[in-house]
Amino acid sequence: MTEPSWQTSSYCAQGEACLSVTAPDDRTVILTESADPSGAILSADPATWAAFLRSVKEASTHHGCAPADVPAPLNGIRAAADNGTGPGPWIEVATGPGDLVRLRETSAPGPVVTSTQAKWEAFVQGILAGEFDHFSELAGDTRPVTS
């Protein structure tokens, strides 16, 4: 079996630990932070991943960001494939205290991926540039992930 390759944002500094995404199969998208000492891994289906990308892009647009800009801190993003009308699963992002950013998927709330604000901002820049859109298409979800 082939090990899936991890993708980081092109905006992440060379050699720096970053938020990384991969898809071990066509039903699962996983995210981790290579420097997170807990080794937490967030897992989502492609539709939930697409909703997450749309929510980040929409939140960034509301802050008046151009795709190359770093958005204002995004606090309390909650994205689900069912447009927030059902039970989820949801991907949640919360900031603080200090420099910390935490991500979790609500159907498995135990694993919490922890990163820093700078790494989150580099990841968001990659999202705004469309670098992670292809992961939402794994199960045939071809809807655009733009807001």
Image (cartoon, rainbow, N blue to C red):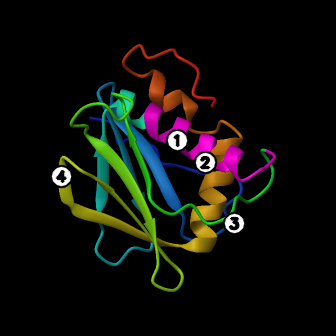
Label of residue 59 in the image? 2
Q: Position of residue 47 (x, y in %)?
A: 37, 27
Please check the rendered image and state whether residue 56 is part of the magenta-colored stretch, yes or no.
Answer: yes
- Looking at marks 1 and 3 on the same chain, the residue that comes earlier in the sequence is marked by 3
Q: CA distance from mark 1 to mark 4?
A: 20 Å
Element at badge 4? Answer: strand
Magenta stretch, residue numbers: 50-66
Instruction: Please tell me which residue is depicted at 36% across the width and 30% down the height of the picture.
Output: 81
Could you tell whether 2 is left or right of 117 in the image? left
Please check the rendered image and state whether residue 62 is part of the magenta-colored stretch, yes or no.
Answer: yes
Q: CA distance from mark 1 to mark 3?
A: 27 Å
Q: CA distance from mark 2 to mark 3?
A: 27 Å
Mark 3 in CB contact with mark 4 (< 8 angstroms): no
Q: CA distance from mark 2 to mark 4?
A: 24 Å
Instruction: Please tell me which residue is depicted at 18% across the width and 52% down the height of the picture.
Output: 108
Q: Quadrant of the C terminus?
A: top right
What amino acid type should be assigned to the residue bearing mark 3?
A: Gln
Q: Magenta span: helix, strand or loop, mainly?
A: helix
Q: Which residue is mark 4?
A: 108
Element at badge 3? Answer: loop
Q: Position of residue 76 (x, y in %)?
A: 45, 59
Q: CA distance from mark 3 to mark 4?
A: 31 Å
Mark 2 in CB contact with mark 3 (< 8 angstroms): no
Label of residue 14 in the image? 3
**How many other residues sit within 10 Å of disc 3, few (<14), some (14-19) or many (≥20)?**
few
- In the image, residue 116 sits, relative to residue 94, either above or below, namely below
Instruction: Please tell me which residue is depicted at 56% across the width and 38% down the height of the picture.
Output: 132
Q: Which residue is mark 1?
A: 55
Task: State the residue lying farthest toward the bottom.
Answer: 98
In front here: 66 or 87? 87
Mark 2 in CB contact with mark 1 (< 8 angstroms): yes
Q: Quadrant of the N terminus?
A: top left
